[in-house]
Image: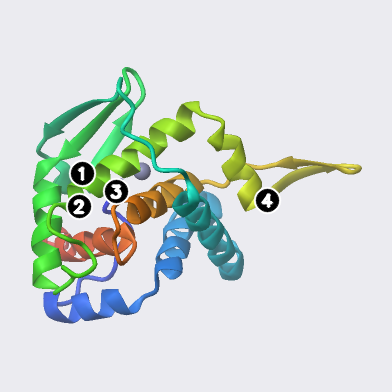
């Protein structure tokens, strides 16, 4: 779960209103568009994929955090642009407490508590990373490809479905949003974090 999908570094108050005005699917499309693999891709296609990936993630059956998943907490998320990350060997979720605290502060500062209840950022980060775990190992990986329907190759009546870079990330965000009862996509938080970090990085 990164904080990267950046908005420009405007003032905090104005930024909050501006960030919230962008709809959730558009955040998904912007995220896909930020990936080099999608450079020059039709924006309408990106929106379509973003919507499909979000729909897929929101519809995933809620599951407990898998037992073998280790959870470790550390600092240094802000400088790396990360809220949390999943590593597969061994299956571990790393939560960056500095980023989580910063996100909670921004929720308060922007008046977004109705969308992100207290403590929900941490819960969403855990739910998000658990989807990476599921999509890494489980049958849902193929189901996501199918939901996106991006054809890599056509051999007569056979279609070979392609992986859509970034779709897993959007599915993870949508799942987290759904199971944690968030009013908006966690990408809004990512954008807020990136915007608040931007002025410091522009030195
Ligand atoms: Zn992720």
Element type where label 3 sits in the image: loop
Between marks 2 and 3, how big is the CA–CA gap?
13 Å
From the image, which quarter does the C terminus lie in? bottom left
Element type where label 2 sits in the image: helix
Locate residue 154, reporting x and y percent: 82, 44
Element type where label 1 sits in the image: helix
Decide which of tag 3 and tag 1 comes sooner along the chain: 3
Decide which of tag 2 and tag 4 comes sooner along the chain: 2
Q: What residue sits right under mark 3 in the picture?
A: 2
Between marks 3 and 4, how big is the CA–CA gap?
25 Å
* Mark linked to residue 149: 4
The residue carrying pointer 1 sits among few (fewer than 14), some (14 to 19) or many (20 or more) residues within 10 Å by Cα, namely few
Q: Is mark 3 within 8 Å of ligand 1?
A: yes
Residue at the spot x=22%, y=80% of the render? 17
Can the viewer see residue 82? no
Q: What residue sits right under mark 2 in the picture?
A: 121
The residue carrying pointer 2 sits among few (fewer than 14), some (14 to 19) or many (20 or more) residues within 10 Å by Cα, namely many
Instruction: Say which quarter of the image contains residue 160.
Output: top right
- Find out whether the residues at labels 1 and 4 contact each other: C-beta distance under 8 Å: no
- Find out whether the residues at labels 3 and 1 contact each other: C-beta distance under 8 Å: no
Between marks 2 and 1, how big is the CA–CA gap?
18 Å
Decide which of tag 2 and tag 3 comes sooner along the chain: 3
Quarter holding ligand 1: top left
């Amino acid at each position: 779960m990164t904080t990267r999908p950046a908005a420009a570094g405007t003032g905090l108050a104005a930024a909050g209103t501006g960030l919230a005005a962008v709809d959730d699917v558009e955040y998904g499309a912007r995220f896909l568009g930020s990936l080099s693999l999608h450079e020059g891709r039709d924006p309408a296609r990106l929106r379509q994929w973003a919507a499909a990936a979000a729909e897929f993630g929101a519809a995933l059956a809620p599951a407990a955090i898998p037992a073998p998943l280790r959870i470790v907490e550390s600092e240094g998320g802000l400088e790396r642009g990360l809220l949390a990350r999943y590593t597969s060997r061994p299956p571990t979720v790393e939560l960056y407490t500095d980023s989580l605290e910063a996100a909670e502060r921004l929720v308060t500062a922007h008046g977004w508590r109705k969308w992100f209840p207290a403590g929900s950022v941490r819960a969403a980060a855990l739910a998000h990373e658990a989807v990476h775990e599921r999509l890494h190992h489980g049958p849902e990986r193929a189901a996501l490809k199918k939901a996106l329907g991006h054809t890599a190759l056509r051999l007569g009546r056979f279609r070979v479905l392609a992986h859509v870079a970034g779709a897993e990330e959007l599915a993870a965000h949508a799942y987290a949003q759904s199971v944690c009862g968030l009013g908006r996509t966690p990408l809004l938080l990512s954008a807020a974090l990136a915007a608040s970090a931007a002025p410091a990085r522009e030195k």
